[in-house]
Amino acid sequence: MTTAFNVSDAVAALESQRTDLIDYINRTTDALIGKIVGADAGPVIGVRIPTLEQARDARNKEGANLTARGTEILYRLFDDGAGYNRASKALGITQTAARNRKGLWEKQGGLNRKRERLDIDD
């Protein structure tokens, strides 16, 4: 008797595992950096890089425009080193819009900007 192999279920399971591992690595690395450089320097502890599912959340957009939540999600993708292509695909915006937002992200200090708290944080 053969068991039906559902490719989409396997891919979903792998993506879930990837998300969990990335989250673990980010939390562990942030904690280690916090111990090395102190609480006032480096990444903000407890602030997470959004998953693809969180980036595609309907609360991130009002029509074609990003909400404040969507902007913070996009900025966190930039914090994680995302380029225009990855960021635009994650949020369902154009690469031009992502490039323009990256310019705003840089003007706000890039990695050193003030981060907003989101429901995805610790």
Image (cartoon, helix red, strand yellow):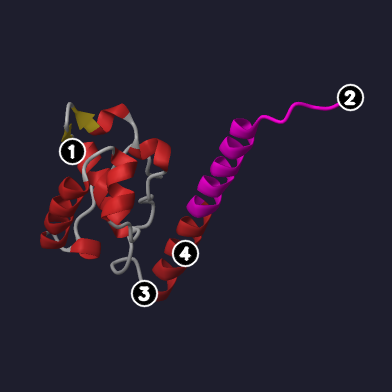
Q: CA distance from mark 3 to mark 2?
A: 58 Å
Of labels 3 and 2, the one closer to you: 2
Q: Which residues are magenta?
A: 1-23
Residue placed at 15% from the left, 62% from the top? 106
Quadrant containing the N terminus in the rendered view: top right
Task: Indicate the secondary structure of the residue bearing disc 1.
Answer: helix
Asked which quadrant contains residue 34, the reply is: bottom left
State if disc 2 and disc 3 touch (CB < 8 Å). Answer: no
Asked which quadrant contains residue 73, the reply is: top left
Look at the picture and state if 36 lies above or below 103. Answer: below
Q: CA distance from mark 1 to mark 2?
A: 53 Å
Q: Badge 4 is on which residue?
A: 29
Give amino acid for label 2.
Answer: Met
| Residue 58 image position (x, y, % from top left) | 30, 27
Q: Badge 2 is on which residue?
A: 1
State if disc 3 and disc 4 touch (CB < 8 Å). Answer: no
Task: Indicate the secondary structure of the residue bearing disc 2.
Answer: loop
Q: CA distance from mark 3 to mark 1?
A: 30 Å
Q: Earlier in the sequence, mark 4 or mark 2?
A: 2
